[in-house]
Amino acid sequence: MNILVCISNVPDTTSKINFKDENKSFDSNGVQFIINPNDEFGLTRAIWLQQKSGAKVTVVTVGDISCEPILRKCLAIGADKAIRIDVVPQDGYFVASQLSALYKNTPYDLIITGRESIDYNGGMVGGILATLLDLPYLANCIQMELEGNVATLQREIDGGKEILSGILPMVIGAQKGLVEESDLIIPNMRGIMQARQKPLEVLSAFSDENTSKVNIFEKPPAKGPVKLVDAGDIDALIDLLQNEAKVL
Amino acid sequence: MSIVVFIESQNGVIKKSGLEVTSYGRAIADLNGDSLVAVVFNPEDTVILNSHGVDKIYSVNTSNNKFFNVDQYSSTLANVVEREGANIIIVSASADGRYLAPILATKLKAAYMSNVVALPSSFNPIIVKRSCFTNKAFNETESKKSKTVLSLSSNAFGVHEKASSPEVFEQKFSEASSSLKVTSVDKVIDKVTIADADIVISGGRGLKGPENWHLIEDLAEVLGAATACSKPVSDMGWRPHSEHVGQTGKPVATNLYFAIGISGAIQHLAGINSSKIKVVINNDPEAPFFKAADYGIVGDAFEVVPKLIEKLKALQQ
Ligand SMILES: Cc1cc2nc3c(=O)[nH]c(=O)nc-3n(C[C@H](O)[C@H](O)[C@H](O)COP(=O)(O)OP(=O)(O)OC[C@H]3O[C@@H](n4cnc5c(N)ncnc54)[C@H](O)[C@@H]3O)c2cc1C
Ligand SMILES: Nc1ncnc2c1ncn2[C@@H]1O[C@H](COP(=O)(O)O)[C@@H](O)[C@H]1O
């Protein structure tokens, strides 16, 4: 079984976000990059399948050379092979179309994306990719069990969950629940050494199709100071919420 | 031109998020002299749409298939969009809406923009403001396609009334083609969900243990609110994972967010800071949450919250 895990290179969750070139582009100066958390849950689930049934796990990212450290980290975590499609993403469709071309050259049994990336938060690459490939897509996947090519899955919905079945190949959007935080694999020295020997293939862009472009970024306006209410004066709080904020 | 909105119902009743996308669609239609077309799935009746400015309704009955099916829903919508020649399609930020939107957009060869927070600033081309970097920033995105699918962030536009007298048509539900099938659904029905709530009451590690959660639940009950929690609280199993909000949990965009015994770590704030009004109750005046809040009480949750519940109950009588 061959699994493709799509990895997005994103700013660490505590990063301060800044822009440059008159707010036309993201300023990566001083920003630490990590594997998108949702993708790491997906990668961990893939590694379990590798350990249990010998699945082969390939990770792929669409991005320039600055994305290689996180691909090496994926290899140290246990992925067998990494692919970097050497082009700076333009939008979600652009990424999905690179990934779909990759799949058409080498099919996989299972494609794992994250529910969404924490940078642009598009929540779109998985759905677009699956539709381009005419494969089923399951968003917000919180459980996946495989038996042969039959998958039993769960999707988190508003107020609960859905239980589904489907047939591979398919695309899933991973999130917490698929594995837990405590299941995440911290690479050890051996993993890190082995990662250096594993293949990291660099491919050039397959196409140049996009559907949108970002014109400008903006930061939210600075917040005014908090209004403090005395702990003994709950009426004052209720009054503010009713008459000033008008939310009660 | 026309604008198509996707409207969800629950037990036959049109959801508030459906009225939000309708209000947003109406505002666009008014700016451009367009007609507003609503596609409603399984409504008991559609009367409420007559007071939200809808010009035409397609009602879809999925009777022999009561579960959400992304493939069938998106194909059904795509059929209406093609027939109406619509150029803007609007869905809400519900779990189903965000699942369906990229698939629908790809079927329509349309551009897709998620996390939309305002009316388009231009229509030719379409340019909209979206939140990004988990609400730490916004961007203006320009569509390069003739059709654009927008998913509207919850509570970003609000619900606005306008009278109309729409014609109602039946729309056939498309056949299923995907191998993916829902076999069952496990859903709390008697509780307000985080996604639909106007008010969310959230508790953190400051509440000390699951046995104290009656404070959160009682406050939620008087306010008709949903309950939520910080990540460590769900990690420790005090509360179910579905209540975990923040950057790696559920996003919250409500009118009123109460944070009780939550410190206000950057990853927590990232997921909730698009809520309109934030109230913090924390016994540490230095807790970072006070910098992000609108109103705050420096005090012990175990003393403040019971008093708050009592006062609110008294008000309701
Ligand atoms: C990659 C990553 C992702 C993360 N994602 C999320 C996320 O999505 N959501 C999330 O919430 N966190 C997330 N976190 C964790 C986050 O960094 C914080 O650790 C977490 O939010 C803290 O939870 P807390 O505020 O409940 O607990 P604490 O930080 O322990 O704060 C407890 C607060 O309660 C107050 N308190 C104590 N006693 C009382 C009392 N009697 N009355 C009133 N107040 C009291 C204290 O003053 C304190 O401010 C993430 C972390 C990482 C590294
Ligand atoms: N540049 C990229 N390269 C590879 N995969 C990506 C890239 N961007 C997004 N993805 C995948 O698509 C998922 C959803 O991303 P998004 O649509 O940007 O929210 C991510 O969790 C990744 O799995």
Image: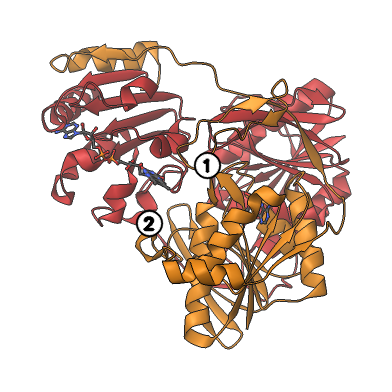
Q: In percent of the image, x 45 and y 62: which residue is there?
A: A161
Q: Residue at x 70, y 72 (%)?
A: B178
User: In this view of the protein, which residue sits in the foreground, B245 or B105?
Assistant: B245
- CA gap, disc 1 and disc 2: 40 Å
Which chain identifier belongs to the orange chain? A
Q: Which mark is residue B126?
A: none
Q: Can I make out residue B101 in this image?
A: no
Comparing B17 with B170, the one in front is B17
Please state if B214 lies on the left or on the right of B190 as rendered. Answer: left
Image quadrant of residue B173?
bottom right
The image's mark for residue A32 is 1
From the rendered image, report the letter of the chain displayed in red. Answer: B
Residue bearing mark 2 = B188
Q: Which chain's residue wears label 2?
A: B
Query: In what quadrant of the picture does the N terminus of chain A appear?
Result: bottom right
Count neighbours of disc 2 (C-alpha within 10 A) and say few if under 14, some if 14 to 19, many if 20 or more: few
* Viewer-nearest residue: B162 or A165: A165
Residue B97 versus residue B40: which sits nearer the camera? B97
User: In the visual, does A146 lie left or right of B283?
Assistant: right
Q: Chain of mark 1?
A: A
Residue type for callout 1: Gln
Q: Secondary structure at mark 2?
A: loop
> Which quadrant contains ligand 1?
top left
Q: Position of residue B308 (x, y in %)?
A: 19, 26
Left or right: residue B244 versus residue A82 is: left
Q: Residue A183 vs residue A118: left or right? A: left
Question: Which type of secondary structure does the marked residue at label 1 adopt?
Answer: loop
